[in-house]
Image: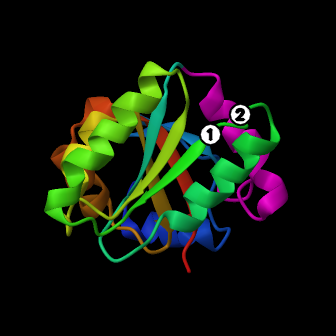
Amino acid sequence: MISMDSQETLKARANGRSGEPQQHVDGVRYIARPDVVAGPEDWPPVWFALAQHQWTSLVLVPAHAGISVLAVARALADAGRTYNEPALALIEAERVAPNRVQGIVAELQDRSALDQRTIVAVASPLEDNSAVPIVRACDVAVLVVPLGDTTLDAARRTLAVVGRGAFLGAITVSAT
């Protein structure tokens, strides 16, 4: 549960030089602390935190341009399949051609009608316009924030492009 006050604060927290973290940034609460999401064994608690909410489609959105959330999506999907969601699907929608967006949205709707959960990984909506309609077609969004690598301005612009109300929360990860 960490907040983003500034780029300097993010870097300080990533380097372990911060006090007790705050609960949210711009109304988006944090689901996982960076010291919790360290390895594969640490993803089940994040899955459990997300699974307790009502959704059939969850999209992971990078907090800024130039990063991939696919590894996070795969880790969450693996945790979900291990713990009670064998039909959980993962849609890799980073860098989707505009003519494929409707097909992805249709797949999300079909799976939702069957009450089957889906995790979607998209590119940053700051650099890929196709991400926006995919994010908006999902029930909930989660902001993925690489610590020490994300500016507050970029995170805010991402929230604004998608719509702040779409976000269930955020996950902080180490910058790679």
- Residue 118 in percent (x, y) is at 51, 39
Assess disc 1: are there few (<14), some (14-19) or many (≥20) residues with their C-alpha within 10 Å of its C-alpha. Answer: many
Q: What residue sits right under mark 1 in the picture?
A: 88
Q: Are marks 1 and 2 in contact (CB under 8 Å)?
A: yes
Does residue 9 appear to the left or right of 133 in the view shown? right
Residue that sits furthest to the right in the current view: 41
Q: Quadrant of the N terminus?
A: top right
Residue that sits furthest to the bottom in the current view: 176
Secondary structure under tag 2 reads loop
Which kind of residue does numbered mark 1 sit on?
A: Leu
Front residue of this view, candidates 36 and 79: 79
| Real-space CA distance between mark 1 and mark 2, rounded to the nearest whole angstrom | 5 Å
Assess disc 2: are there few (<14), some (14-19) or many (≥20) residues with their C-alpha within 10 Å of its C-alpha. Answer: some
Q: What residue sits right under mark 2 in the picture?
A: 85
Q: How many marks?
A: 2
Question: Does the magenta run of residues contain 39?
Answer: yes
- Residue 113 in percent (x, y) is at 43, 20
Question: Does the magenta run of residues contain 9?
Answer: no
Q: Residue at horizontal 65%, vertical 50%?
A: 76
Point out the stretch of residues depicted in magenta.
Answer: 33-53
Q: Residue at horizontal 49%, vertical 24%?
A: 55
Does residue 104 appear to the left or right of 174 in the view shown? left
Q: Residue at horizontal 55%, vertical 28%?
A: 116
- Residue 143 in percent (x, y) is at 42, 49
